[in-house]
Image (cartoon, rainbow, N blue to C red):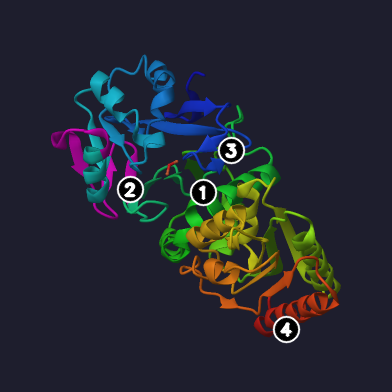
Amino acid sequence: MDKRQIKEKIYWLGAVDWDRRLFDSLIPLPDGTTYNAYLIEGSQKTALLDTVDPAMADELMAQLDGFPKIDFIVSHHAEQDHSGAIPRVLDRFPEAKVVATPKAKGMLMDLLKISENAFITVQDGETLSLGDKTLKFIHTPWVHWPETMVTYLEEDHILFSCDFYGSHIATTDLFVTDQGRVYEAAKRYFAEIMMPFRNVITKNIEKLKEYDIQMIAPSHGQIYDRPAWIMDAYRDWVMGAPHNLVVLPFVSMHGSTRQLVDHLTSALVGHGVRVELFNLAVTDIGKLAMALVDAATVVVGTPTVLAGPHPLAAYATLLANALRPKAKFLSIIGSYGWGGKTVETLAGMIPNLKVEVLEPVLCKGVPSEIDFEALDKLASAIVEKHKEHGFE
Ligand code: FEO
């Protein structure tokens, strides 16, 4: 695809990756993604903001045909889906300087072997004039690596946010056209890579308050020409209270754990608690991550297999531990045949979660009346906890 104009002298460059279905060999991308770079032609200097995944570098290089010079390559983030084509751009424009945070400089030198003398480092709040356009660099660590920054284009009130506020959607629409679809994609993206850093992101959101941001141009997905709603959504995901929601990832081998799951779900719903079930044998892990953004309680349902939790339940638990959702309560339910250490094993896998563990319910084989009563008690405990905290 050719470059596209956003505003006078400001262009979208980049690549639409319609085929990609997995990121980091981990994260499902049901709708593909884009790698957005941007080019700003000032009256005196020209800046390229980020590049693209190296696999699609040819597209970017073709879009740069016709530009006689690039003075600056701003690298917001050293991860290679944005920085990976910098060496190619430097090959063509050897006089260009790579503009990065001091931390990003070191990472880019390590990761891409870019020579030290190619860099200009910028401090938090520093500006760079392109003549009639001014780039202001705002350090925003941990969105989602330690070196990340964003650029505010002062005259045009555009925030170039890199991964921050991004979404994985392959589309030819330059600007957001379907807010509902982008909300879901952005939330999935937040859940998968931003959520673990909620506390630092809170500071970054506060830091951006003083800017009159009229457009957000991220490095994945569409451009927000009316950005208030996505900024509000981030505020809610990062700082909002958990919802009156139980997320219940489970796996069942012979149907007994499934019976427990269904009974607990009914009991909770009967008390006005929302429940989202995720059968781990078939679920999209991204959907589970999204649900974890809002959940007040997580209940893991697992049979005991080989004396411990089912590997799929262990995987989901490890993932939840890595994503650090704001859930306050956790429990475990499941069926076993002859014994094991399911509860101890799973409990040992969540050191990052600041949760109160509610009494687990484990039954031998097919659940009996006494097990259903224990589930009713667990449901009541969850209901009470949610009420106490005012989760809605
Ligand atoms: Fe889109 Fe963290 O790279």
Residue topped by disc 2: 136
Q: Nearer the viewer, mark 2 or mark 3?
A: 3
Residue topped by disc 3: 29
Residue located 72% across and 82% down the image: 381
Q: Earlier in the sequence, mark 2 or mark 4?
A: 2
Q: Earlier in the sequence, mark 3 or mark 4?
A: 3
Q: Amino acid at mark 1?
A: Tyr
Q: Quadrant of residue 260?
A: bottom right
Say whether marks 2 and 4 touch (CB < 8 Å): no
Q: Amino acid at mark 4?
A: Glu
Q: Is 66 on the left-hand or right-hand side of 176?
A: left
Residues under labels 3 and 4: Cα distance? 37 Å
Q: Name the quarter showing ligand 1.
A: top left
Residue topped by disc 1: 165
Question: Residue 95 at what x, y percent from top left?
Answer: 19, 25
Is 211 magenta? The answer is no
Q: Which of 6/198 is in front?
A: 198
Q: Which of 378/202 is in front?
A: 378
Q: Quadrant of residue 356?
A: bottom right
Q: Earlier in the sequence, mark 1 or mark 2?
A: 2
Question: Residue 318 at what x, y percent from top left?
Answer: 52, 58
Q: Which residues are magenta?
A: 111-137
Residue topped by disc 4: 384
**Dot label at residue 219:** none
Q: Amino acid at mark 3?
A: Leu
Residues under labels 3 and 1: Cα distance? 16 Å
Answer yes or no: is residue 198 visible. yes
327 shown above or below 133:
below
Q: Earlier in the sequence, mark 4 or mark 1?
A: 1
Q: Earlier in the sequence, mark 3 or mark 1?
A: 3
107 shown above or below 124:
above
